[in-house]
Image: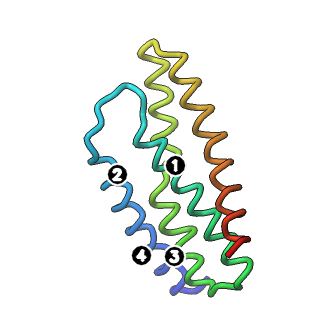
Amino acid sequence: MQLASFVFVGLGGAVGAMLRYAVSLLPYKGTFPVLTLATNLLGALAIGVIAGMAARRQAPEGLVLFLKTGVCGGFTTFSTFSLEAWQLLEKGHPGLAVTYMLLSVLGCLAGVAAGLWAASRW
């Protein structure tokens, strides 16, 4: 592995993590984890666009590592999704938990598909 690859991923991860933190600061206090859902849906759409554009235009590997692995990886959060789903179950909100899980998984798959579709049109 090249050191440059690690640097691209690390820098992208830092950008993604800072963006993720910025989203978490938005003023929302409801029970349903809207901010994490929105983050993951946006990240899924973004990674679809990035993957599609990279495949069509043969983007430099460093750029793809920075955006896809770094930024998208640092921005999206499966661990927070998992914790919040568990907490909804623990707090006696099984309907919200299942809704959250379904919206997250199906929505993120739809986001990737939409991103790939959009990239194929550019």
Tell which circle, 4 or 3, labels the residue nearer the N-terminal end: 4
Read off the residue under disc 1: 40
| Residue type beneath disc 1 | Asn
Which amino acid does the dot numbered 2 rest on?
Val
x then y, percent, for residue 110: 67, 48
Q: Amino acid at mark 3?
A: Phe
Pick whichever of labels 2 and 3 is earlier in the sequence: 2
Instruction: Identify the residue at horizontal 68%, vertical 48% (top origin).
Output: 109
Mark sitting earlier along the chain (2/1): 2
Query: Does label 1 or label 4 sit earlier along the sequence?
Result: 4
**Disc 2 or disc 4, which is closer to the eye?**
2
Residue at x 63%, y 32% (from the top left corner)? 102
Question: How many angstroms separate mark 2 from mark 4 (CA)?
Answer: 19 Å
Question: Which residue is the site of mark 4?
Answer: 11
- Residue at mark 3: 66
Residue at which label 2 appears: 23
Quadrant assignment for the N terminus: bottom right
